[in-house]
Image (cartoon, grey):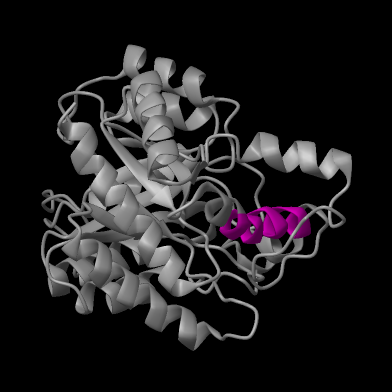
């Protein structure tokens, strides 16, 4: 049976607050834990009022502390924004508190706009240090070596699992080179999906972390009891994409017709970016999931349900869990 997992952007909805988002995230995490989902990841974004997970490690602690078995982690931490030592200490702390349930997915993008990036970055160099930073971070989680002067306490010896996140060929090549599991952001960046899969699998080098490739793409999930209902709840995500591309990120808005909201060019762009989203009733979603799994040969699927109504969001993950079990039967 293929494993299903959750990417939660901790949406702040119109009429709600960050506090509401965190309560909903914990409720959803408990819900999907009971449904047998493998992991629950949160993503680092900044200067985006509709996403509450900017302090990602803090929110991970909130979720891990309120659950029992599901893996909880970052999907991901945008490493260029941070010192590897600080991230090692944060996730070493999480692993010390919650045991072997913590994942650390690492992204190369800043997770924000250029102006905010300059406010976040620990230095002003344009040099790409991401590969070196990943290696440094991994080193902090290993057993201390003779002569090592700098340690992550807590963190040393805990071997917190690292993932490389990506939306292009770059991350696939790095994950393959380092022998790490790889997660691809096909929920918003579909163009390089098949190229990334091929590069990762063909170039993978077995490592102390992983013996063979492990690939997890992320796709949008908008499942409901009817196709019409699913298409309607999907409009909140579509509208959020339009607003982001207009340079006006905001709160997640309630479902509404988009007929007069977007231009033909905006419509085409958003539909292209979200082309792998599974939207529909159970039979429709089952067919789309089956096709996507067969196309990618994924080891695990991460599902992102950016849905305005919390109950509808929970229902979407319920439907997916039922379909996961159904697909396992053939």
Image: 88 above or below 188: below
Left or right of 179, for residue 185: right
Foreground pick, 217 / 86: 217
Left or right of 245, for residue 56: left
Q: Position of residue 54 (x, y in %)?
A: 51, 71
At x 49% / y 45%, what residue is drawn? Answer: 280
Foreground pick, 41 / 89: 41
Magenta-colored span: 232-244
Q: Position of residue 199 (x, y in %)?
A: 42, 17
Left or right of 29, for residue 141: left
Q: Per the image, is 52 magenta?
A: no
Task: Evaluate whether residue 151 shows in this view.
Answer: no
Image: 164 above or below 318: above
Asked where in the image residue 99 lies, by quadrant, the reply is bottom left
Specify the principal SS of the magenta part: helix
Q: Position of residue 57 (x, y in %)?
A: 36, 70
Foreground pick, 243 / 247: 243
Foreground pick, 215 / 92: 215
At x 53% / y 70%, what residue is drawn? Answer: 11
Q: Position of residue 203 (x, y in %)?
A: 35, 15
Image: 40 above or below 172: below
Asked where in the image residue 325 lies, by quadrant, the reply is top left
């Amino acid at each position: 049976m293929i494993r299903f997992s959750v990417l939660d952007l901790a949406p702040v909805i119109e009429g709600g607050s960050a506090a509401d988002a965190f309560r909903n995230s914990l409720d959803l995490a408990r819900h999907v834990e009971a449904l047998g989902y493998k992991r629950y990841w949160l993503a680092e974004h900044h200067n985006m009022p509709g996403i509450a997970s900017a302090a990602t490690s803090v929110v991970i602690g909130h979720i891990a502390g309120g659950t029992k078995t599901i893996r909880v982690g970052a999907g991901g931490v945008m490493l260029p924004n941070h010192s590897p030592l600080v991230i090692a200490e944060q996730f070493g702390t999480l692993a010390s508190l919650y045991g072997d349930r913590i994942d650390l997915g690492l992204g190369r993008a800043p997770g924000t706009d250029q102006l905010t990036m300059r406010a976040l970055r620990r230095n002003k160099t344009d040099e790409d240090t991401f590969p070196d930073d990943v290696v440094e971070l991994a080193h902090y989680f290993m057993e201390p070596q003779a002569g090592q002067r700098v340690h992550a306490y807590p963190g040393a010896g805990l071997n917190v699992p690292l993932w490389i996140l990506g939306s292009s060929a770059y991350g696939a090549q790095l994950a393959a080179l380092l022998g790490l599991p790889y997660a691809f952001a096909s929920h918003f960046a579909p163009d390089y999906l098949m190229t990334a899969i091929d590069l990762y699998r063909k170039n993978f080098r077995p490592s102390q972390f992983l013996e063979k490739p492990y690939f997890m793409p992320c796709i949008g999930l908008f499942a409901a009891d009817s196709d019409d209902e699913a298409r309607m709840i999907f409009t909140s995500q579509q509208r959020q994409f339009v607003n982001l591309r207009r340079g006006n990120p905001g709160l997640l808005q309630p479902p509404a017709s988009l007929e007069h909201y977007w231009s033909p060019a905006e419509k085409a762009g958003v539909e292209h970016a979200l082309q792998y989203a599974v939207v529909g009733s159970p039979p429709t979603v089952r067919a789309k999931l089956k096709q996507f799994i067969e196309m990618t040969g994924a080891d695990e699927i991460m599902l992102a349900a950016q849905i305005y109504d919390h109950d509808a969001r929970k229902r979407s993950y319920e439907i997916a869990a039922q379909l996961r079990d159904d697909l396992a039967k053939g």
